[in-house]
Structures are given as structure tokens and as C-alpha cells.
Amino acid sequence: MDRTWKSMAQKLPVEPCGDLVEDVLKGIYMEEGNLGDAMLLYHREAVTLMEEIKQTMSPEDWERRERTAKHRWGARCTCTACGEDFIAGYTKGGIVLREGPDGVIYDGYAEPGVDANVYLDGETVLCPYCWTSLEVTRRAELRRGRTYQVLQAEVVNVEAYTVVMYWLVSRHFDDTGGDYTMFCPHAALLIDLDGKLRRFRAERVGREVRDVIWHPCTYTRDPMQIPYYSWEANRHRKIGGWTLAYGPDLGGHTGEKSALDEYIGEGGVWPGAYLHVWEKYPQVENLVRQGFSAAVYEAIDGFLDRAAQLQGLRDAPPINWVDWNEVKPHRMLHMSKSAFREIKEKRWREGDAKCWDRYRRQIQKADAMDFEYCRERIGSKAVGQLLEMIAAGWEDLLPLRAVRYLEKRRMLEDGVQLLIDYRKMLHDAHMAETEETLWPRDLMAAHERITQYWANHFKTAYQLGFTSTFIRYRDLEWTDGDLCIVLPRVEADLVSEGKILRHCVGTYGKDHCSGKPVFFVRHHRRPERSYYTLQIDMTRGIPKEIQLHGYGNEHHGEHKQYKHKIPQKVRDFCDRWEREVLMPWFALQRSNPPKKQNQRKKRQEIA
């Protein structure tokens, strides 16, 4: 068998397909890739400023020109995108470029002033020649070069076998302004005739990239889950990569029954991880082929994307909402055949499948069509909120009953959160919980009354907790220039927010101080004016958004009879903040626990 795989190794390709190379290079030059951005390299250089030479000049003109010459420090700049060299002004830690009245940037020596801008290291500037966006970088920082790398995967057919090829794409910058890109063979995962995975590694035996020998391995670990070097990554170690979105027809090859093409077609970028799931549970193909490809893709990629930030990867990510003891799709999801036939056309996402799994476990004699009725009207997230309330003791808040109640009052959109808030405040106020108060005829008016009650009787009891919460999360305050994220300093800030926006955030002081902080979304130019309120759950394995609401929970009018939507720019800003600020901060907190905890662990070990 070893001879078979050694001979097979000789048939593996040593160059990626043209489509992959084209996609990568296009990604670099269109600034859509993950291999670094173009840079404006600069170093200090002496510049002599003299009068311009005129067409006719007398000896006195030449003498005056020499006498009035000035010597200054300028910056010699090089654009790595177009390769042009030019002179700019120099300042400590950056360069100075002239700007014309039309906003156009010009080369040439300039000093800081009204008609010139200063660009420091790390800032972005447009090249005056090719208009490419460049990162200002001191040339001395690239004396040893700078290498960005990313793994690129593609699916190929080699004889009767389906193989996932992994290429390590390297882009190297040097201090002269040049950069070059290489595609190096890295690893391969092959599906054998028995549906098992075989891994191969590449060994370079010459100077050329093509001088490679493939060797069979005794292990099958997913290559994308093994750290590799890249300059911009944390500690220069990167995990993950990209996958070519299109590949060959797998019919007649060993990957035909893996549904790998469906997974990649859905947007999956961890083909090795998917194949490990398929190797362990071949019946996953049945789910993928029967309308649940999006749910499986999100389960695998979502888990690995989160785990990559926390450095906690595994070859076969768990898909806990599937019963792997079954083979038929409807039994794997604990549905009837008729319900499955109808639901598979809805193309559930992972959140829908996970919510259904929880629904059937919590609700006796759960019916998939009842769940689908609720999901289509209020969404899986809202159904999950109702299930949490049931688990907490509000057993009458069955999703089907709540949906029909809200549907009758035409409050399906955001009505679940309103009902939950009302129930919690009613309970905390120790008011009589009768059928009439639990299911009021006018939910909006009842919510307004209980909110006003708490606004009038609320006491400032959490100031110490507010101070510690602010210290803990103050690094999450952020702005993009238009909107900003602000933390409340004292309890009165929450109460004021609730009064101005006429929602119940004023009662969230306890949640705010116990791991579910509230953040204010404000206009950067008017940070004191209430706009939108965001709450995040920090007590889970990863941060989770609880709610985002503005004035009156998106209801207005004298009796809050009108409904308005959250502006898209607010939604996009919050998503960007969670992606670019919150998740990296949370991962850093996980990787660097507080010193006190470390000291406590050391004392326990010593004891």
C-alpha cells in the first residue's frame, strides 16, 4: 500500500491552476486579498531648494540663486504599486505632501502648512502618480523584508481520486519598493477508494518552486488548522486561508459522494475540516444534498472562524444539532417525513437548525411545522429568547402561543423583546400576575406604564459596579468618524437613556454590571445626545448581541402606533464594531487572563 501512495504522490500537481493564480493576483492588485497592502516607502534625504532656472539669466541672477539656496531634510519616497520614486517633505515619523486646491496630491518638497498634509507611519495616502492607496512606511523597517502568506485550497481530480490541494501563497516586500509573489506547494488531502483521507506533504529539493517531491504522511490533520508564518498575524502566526470557489466535476471520482462541491459552492473555506466531518459521519452528505448545505456550512465555518481567533481549532468541528446515530435526513433532525419535505425548501441556516433542536428538547410533543410557523413570523432568534424564558420559569410563554398573541395585535416585529421586557419588569415589581396582566390587551400601553413605574422608583444602587464595568470595557469605546460607541459611567446614564429613548434600558443596571454591558451608539459630533442602545452578552464563549434599539423600541407617535426601522448605517456600524473591535479584544482577554488569576493558579500549584 505504501508503494501505491508513493507512486500516487508523484502524480500530484506542483503548480496551481490558472483560475486560482488569477484570483489571487486580482485580489492583490484590487486590494481584495489577504497578502498585504501597497506601501509608500520613505527615508530621509538632503534636499537643496533653489530658484528655478529661467530662460535667460545674468551673472547676478546665478550668484543670487547660489546665495539664496537652502538645504533641508526631505523624504525620498517609493510607491510599491507603480514603482515611481519622488521627493516629499520630511517630518519626524512621516512625510509631507503638497495638496492642490482641487484636493489632488502632488510630489515635491513641502513643509507642513495650509496647502500641505502630514502623513505619519501607518497612515494612508494616495500615490501622486498611480492614485493607489498606500500605507506610509519607513524604509528601514523593511531592511529584512516583509512577507505576507496565505493558504489557498483548490479541488482537483487526479486519476480516480479527488484531492484538495493546498498552496502557500507568499508575497514579499523589500526596502527597494519591489515585491514578488510565489505559489508554493504545501499539502494535499486525498480521498481514497474507501472514503478515508490521505495526506501528503511537499518537500522542496531545488531553488525553483516547481522542484518539489510529494511524500505520504501518517496523519491527516487539516492543513488550514496548522499555524504558518505571516508578518501581519498575531505573533506572526496565521491560521486558515481561502478556497477556490469553483472546481472540476466530481462525478466518477472518490469525492462524488462527499458533497464537497456543495459545501464549497455554499461559500465554505475549510474543505479539510468538512472532509473530516464527512469521514466520521458520511451521512452528512444526505443533509447537504437535501437543502441543509447552508446550515452545515455555517456550523463548520462559523465554529472554525471563532476558534481561529481563540487558537482552539479541531479537525472535525462538532455539529451538535444533528443526531448522527440516524442516516435518513428527517430522522437526523427528528422530524416527520412530511415536515422535512416542506422545511427543506426553506433552506434553513445554522441558527434555525440549532433553535429547532432546542425547541424539540424543551417542548413536549414538539411539532416541526409549529416551529416553522413561529420561525417564519418572528425568526429563530426570537424563538430562542422565548425558550430561554421558559427555561427560566415562565412556562406559559410557549412560542406558538406568544406568536399568535403578537400576530393578533400586529406586533410580530420586535414584539417578542417587548413582551419579555414587560414580563421581567412586571415580575421584578412584584405586581399581581393574572391572565389579564400577563397577556394585556394593549401590550404597548402596559409596557409604557411599567417602564414609567421603574423610572420613578429606580434607585442608584450599582455605582461601584458601574465604575468597575467602565474600567473593564473602556477599551471598547470606538468611532469611525461618523458614529461612536460610548459606555455609561454611572447608573444615571442608563436611566437618562431609558427616559429619553422611552425604552426600558434604565432597568438594566444589574445586567450591565454582571457581564451583559450596555453600550450607547451616538453621533461622533454629538456624543452627549442619545441615539441607539446596544447590549452585548459577555458571559458566553464568544460575545453575543442581545439587542439593539432606538426611540421607543422603534415605535413612535402619540400612542406609539407607528413603526420605523433601524437605519442601515447604524446596523452596519455595530456589525463593524463587533467584528473589528469587540472580537479581537475578547480574544486578547482570553489569551491574556488577569495577572491575579495567574498568581492564584501558581499559589495552588505550589500548595
Image: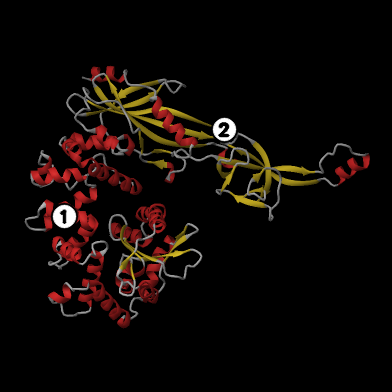
Q: Is residue 358 visible?
A: no
Task: Determine the residue positioned at 89% across, 40% down.
Answer: 62
Q: How is the image coloured?
A: secondary structure
SS at mark 2 in the image: loop
**Residue assigned mark 1:** 373
Q: Earlier in the sequence, mark 2 or mark 1?
A: 2
Q: Is residue 158 visible?
A: yes
Is 475 on the left or on the right of 139, as rendered? Answer: left
Q: Residues within 10 Å of mark 1 (few under 14, many from 20)?
A: some
Residue sitting nearer the eye, 551 or 591: 551
> CA separation, marks 2 and 1?
60 Å
Which quarter of the rendered picture does the N terminus lie within? top left
Q: Position of residue 593 (x, y in %)?
A: 36, 57
Q: Please count the marks in the image.
A: 2
Contact between marks 2 and 1 (CB within 8 A): the answer is no
Residue sitting nearer the eye, 556 or 428: 556
Q: Tell me: residue 291, above or below residue 592.
A: above
Question: Which of the numbered marks, if any, corresponds to residue 546?
Answer: none
Task: Determine the residue positioned at 26% across, 77% down.
Answer: 450
Q: Position of residue 445 (x, y in %)?
A: 25, 75
Task: Determine the residue positioned at 17% across, 64% down.
Answer: 402
Looking at the image, the residue that sits furthest to the bottom is: 457
Residue sitting nearer the eye, 207 or 13: 13
Q: Amino acid at mark 1?
A: Tyr
Q: Residues within 10 Å of mark 2 (few under 14, many from 20)?
A: some
**Residue assigned mark 2:** 178
Q: In the figure, residue 7 lies in which quadrant?
A: top left
SS at mark 1 in the image: helix
